[in-house]
């Protein structure tokens, strides 16, 4: 703090920046401009990467639809069946690219259905003739494979009662009665 007899010189006021700090501000501004330029170039790279990723996803979706168009779903497959046996069963329809038997992800056991991918979509019609054919003592269900659409699923709810609340009674109501009155001995239910 300045003493009573001393005055603050005119050059150094609270709102003025001393001359030596002026160079530092210019350096900071230049550094900030460099960082902004780097961030803009990174943003441009990210936009470019996103565009290529979107293009690849679109191509992948078209490819998946093409594969699904030449594939069939085979239901009621015996749990002991191998992909080679299924391929031999459908070999009369034409050239097969792949046979996939789906497994339960927790137990590793077969789920009882498979997908067969043919080399050409025209072969799917020939494979549909084998619907209800007997394979290892079981009637197979053969239908064209459907393409899963994102966001379109049946859901896994409990039916028409919503959220599984119970028999449609409000809380406290129903068969058991919400209010039991004062204690009249032991009543577990």
Image (cartoon, helix red, strand yellow):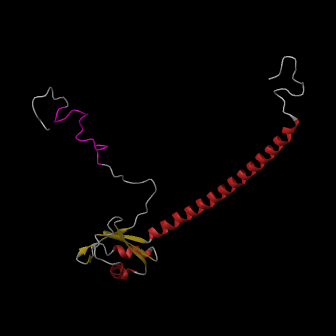
Depicted 120 relative to depicted 19: above or below? below
Residue 15 shown in magenta? no
The quarter of the picture where the N terminus appears is top right
The magenta-colored residue range is 158-177
**Horizontal relation, residue 127 to residue 66: left or right:** left
Q: Dividing the picture into quarters, in which one does residue 177 lie?
A: top left
Q: Main secondary structure of the magenta part?
A: loop
Residue at 23 percent across and 32 percent down: it is 172
Number of marks present in the image shown: 0
Whole-percent x and y of residue 164?
Answer: 28, 44
Whole-percent x and y of residue 151?
Answer: 45, 53
Residue at 24 percent across and 41 percent down: it is 166
Residue at 10 percent across and 29 percent down: it is 184
Whole-percent x and y of residue 31?
Answer: 78, 48
**Horizontal relation, residue 44 to residue 59: left or right:** right
Depicted 30 relative to depicted 123: above or below? above
**Horizontal relation, residue 164 to residue 187: left or right:** right
Residue at the extreme top: 4
Residue at 81 percent across and 40 percent down: it is 25
Residue at the extreme right: 10
Residue 159 shown in magenta? yes
Depicted 64 relative to depicted 18: above or below? below
Out of 186 and 69, give the one closest to the viewer: 186
Q: Dividing the picture into quarters, in which one does residue 142 lie?
A: bottom left
Whole-percent x and y of residue 118?
Answer: 43, 76
């Amino acid at each position: 703090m300045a003493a009573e007899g001393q005055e603050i010189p005119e050059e150094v006021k609270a709102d003025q920046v001393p001359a030596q700090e002026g160079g530092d501000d210019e350096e900071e501004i230049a550094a900030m401009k460099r960082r902004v330029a780097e961030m803009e170039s990174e943003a441009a790279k990210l936009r470019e990467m996103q565009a290529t990723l979107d293009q690849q996803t679109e191509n992948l979706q078209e490819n998946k639809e093409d594969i699904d168009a030449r594939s069939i779903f085979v239901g009621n497959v015996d749990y002991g069946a191998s992909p080679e046996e299924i391929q031999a069963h459908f070999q009369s329809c034409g050239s097969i690219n792949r046979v996939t038997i789906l497994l339960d992800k927790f137990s590793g056991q077969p789920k009882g259905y498979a997908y067969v991918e043919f080399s050409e979509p025209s072969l799917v019609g020939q494979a549909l003739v084998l619907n209800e054919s007997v394979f290892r003592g079981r009637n197979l269900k053969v239908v064209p494979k459907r393409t899963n659409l994102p966001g379109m699923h049946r859901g896994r709810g409990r039916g028409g009662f919503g959220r599984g609340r119970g028999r449609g009674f409000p809380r406290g109501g129903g068969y058991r009665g919400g209010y039991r009155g004062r204690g009249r001995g032991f009543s577990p239910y």
